[in-house]
Amino acid sequence: MARTTIADLAAKKRAGEKWVMLTCYDHVTASVFEDTGVPVLLVGDSAANNFLGEENTIPVTTDELIPLARAVVRGNTTALVVADLPFGSYETGVSDALATGIRFFKEAKVQAVKLEGGKKVVPQIEALIAAGIPVMGHLGLTPQSVHALGGFKVQGRGDDGQRIKEDARALQKAGVFALVLELVPASLGREIAEELSIPIIGIGAGNGCDAQVLVWTDLMGLTPKPPKFARKYLDLRSIMISAVESFTADVKSGEFPSPNETFE
Ligand code: KIV
C-alpha cells in the first residue's frame, strides 16, 4: 500500500468518508499502526507530556522532536506523517518557520508539518507551502498557548465562535491541507466542517468533523488521567502491569527461563 497523500485526504472529504489520525512518537508503535492502516500519524508536540515527561507541550524542542519523527517515518510506510512545529520555532517569523519546516523535511523526512494559530501565522504558512511543505493548521484550544488561554478550556463558545471561523477561513485561504479543531462546541465543529472544503480533524470538537484524532496513549489506556474527550479503547496500563507481575513471579519461582528458553 502506498503512503497516504494530501490528495487522498481531499478525496475522502469530497466522498464524505471519515478517517482517523493518531499521535505517534516511536518506531515500534508506528509499525503497529501500519498494520491497522491508519492513514495519518501525527508526531505531536504532545510527545512532551506523553513521552518525555513534561507538564505540557511548551518545553519540547525541534532537536527533541526530529529523532522521534524520523523513527515514526521509518516505522510506517503507509501513513502520511505530520510533525508539529514546536513552540518557539515558528512564531518569531517566516524565516524561523521555514528553517524548522525544512529541518523536519530533510532530517525526519515527514510529509507535512502542523502549527498552531490563526491569521497571525498565515505568513509562516504561506512561506512553508511555497517551499513545498504541506501544512496542517490547528485552532480552538491550542495547547502551546495554554497560559494565554487560562488553562485547558473549551474555546469558541458564543461570539468567540466567529473568531475561530474567521481564522479557519484564513487558514484554508492560505492553503492548509487540513485543520485540527480542538476543544470547541460540537455545533462549531460541524459548521466549520460543513463550510470549509478542507478536512477538519476534531479532538473534543464533536462528531460533525471529517476526521478524529486521539493521542495514542489515551486511546490505549496508558495515560493516567486522560482528558474527558478521549475514549479508552484498551486498558494497556493494566495489561502491562500484569505482564511484568507474571514475569517477576515466574523468575522468583524458577519457572522462567524454562528449558525451551535455555541454551546447552
Ligand atoms: O500534539 C498533539 O498531540 C496534537 C493533537 C492534540 C492534535 O496537536
Image: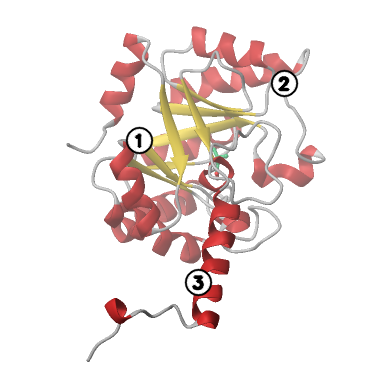
Callout 3 amino acid: Phe
Residue 112: give x, y in percent of width and height. 36, 41
- Nearest to the observer: residue 14 or residue 28: 28
Q: Are marks 2 and 1 in contact (CB under 8 Å)?
A: no
Nearer the observer: mark 3 or 1; the answer is 3
Q: Secondary structure at mark 3?
A: helix
User: Between disc 3 and disc 1, whose residue precedes?
Assistant: 1
Q: Is mark 2 within 8 Å of ligand 1?
A: no
Q: Quadrant of the N terminus?
A: top left
- The residue under label 2 is 156
Residue 129 showing in the rendered view: yes
N-term mark: 2 or 3: 2
The nearer-to-camera label among 2 and 1 is: 1
Q: For this view, does 231 lie left or right of residue 70?
A: right
In the rendered image, which residue does mark 1 sit on? 38
Three-letter residue code for mark 2: Gly
Q: Which residue is mark 3?
A: 247
Which residue occupies the extreme right position in the image?
150
Q: Position of residue 262 (x, y in %)?
A: 29, 84
